[in-house]
Image (cartoon, rainbow, N blue to C red):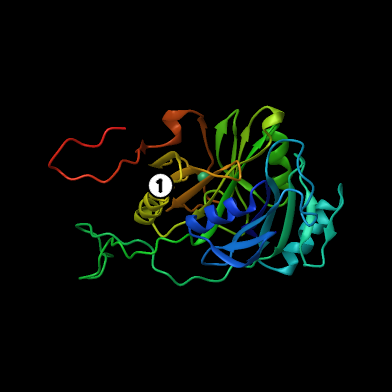
Amino acid sequence: MKIIGPDYLVFGVDNVNACVQYLTDYGLKPQGLDDTGGYLEALDGTGIVIRHRDDPRLPKAMETASTLRETVYGVADEASLQAIEAELSKDREVIRGEDGVLRVVDDMGFALGFQITCRRALDLPGELSNAPGASVTRDVNALGASDEMPALPRSLSHVVYFVPDHAKAEAFYTRIGFVCTDRFIEVGPFLRPAGTLDHHTLFMIQTPPFMKGIEHFTFHMGGPTEVMLAGTRFVEKGYESFWGPGRHQLGSNWFWYFNSPMGCHVEYDADMDLHDDTWTARVAPAGADNSQYFLFHYQEKWAPGGPPPKH
Ligand SMILES: [Fe+2]
């Protein structure tokens, strides 16, 4: 079951225009939106669907305040779709929609879809640095950063759920080929499906049942400089930083999280570790010491000549 990762997430929100504006400012590209919302995509075609919470096209809402209505995974081939259908139809309804998406509900009540992936292959350089002793460096006369750098989201990376029973939640995903890359004790697993080497495409956090839903999602950027540039531009547009920038420990991904009108956090990330089946999962207690190697806070631009700006 070669699941690659989430192709798109579907939200049912109160304020469609605010969410569309937010995601456009985040860097996604609207694709033929109308007054009822629509699809906004990253460079590889993965993206986010925004609809009004009462839109009849949406899957059923959760009993909590979560605005996430569906997580649709991209798979590598038809054989994977058939294998998922065969496994999950043992104990639940599996529906193949007119859009070709295989739909089920997981053991926590999250609506899921599976489709042949919509991801377009990207041919873009990652961030290169100049380091003494390194054989691969940035080209001579090539700039490491500039005001013209686009810093656009490349690909939907991962989604994080609040779940009331992380062990039961994990067991479901194990049935469709996810493995645990690393784990926070009594919190939840970082899960990696069979079609990617990314450290995680799904992380789950144990919470009381009333919190069940989405905690955040993120798109991969081209490198740490793009995370910093995109995040700085986002703050300068008036959006509120929630956590970051910094670098996580499990996964080594650079991160910067923001508040959003979808009621969840939205992250920029970059340079996540890759793992294969030779990797042995680490187990760590959760907490600030294990959540990041370092953490910065945004400050307004400044130059020597007076005191730094106060916050
Ligand atoms: Fe994340």
Closest to the observer, 278 or 58: 58
Measured along the vertical axis of the image, is residue 48 above or below residue 304? below
Q: Residue at x 20, y 70 (%)?
A: 141
Is 17 on the left or on the right of 84, as rendered?
left
- The image quadrant that residue 21 belongs to is bottom right
Say if residue 207 shows up in the picture: yes
The number of discs equals 1
Would the CB of label 1 be found within 8 Å of ligand 1?
no
Closest to the observer, 184 or 235: 235
Measured along the vertical axis of the image, is residue 260 above or below residue 276? above
Residue 117: image x %, image y %? Answer: 65, 66
For label 1, count other residues whose C-alpha is less than 10 Å away and answer few (under 14), some (14-19) or many (20+).
Answer: some
Q: Quadrant of the N terminus?
A: bottom right
Q: Residue at x 38, y 49 (%)?
A: 236
Residue 214: image x %, image y %? Answer: 63, 42
- The image quadrant that residue 241 belongs to is top left
Closest to the observer, 233 or 223: 233
Indicate the amino acid at tag 1.
Val
Residue 124: image x %, image y %? Answer: 42, 70
Residue hosting label 1: 235
Q: Residue at x 75, y 40 (%)?
A: 62
- The image quadrant that residue 63 belongs to is top right
Residue 292: image x %, image y %? Answer: 41, 37
Is 8 on the left or on the right of 285, as rendered?
right
Say if residue 272 shows up in the picture: no
Q: Quadrant of the C terminus?
A: top left
Is 191 on the left or on the right of 87, as rendered?
left
Measured along the vertical axis of the image, is residue 20 above or below residue 34? above
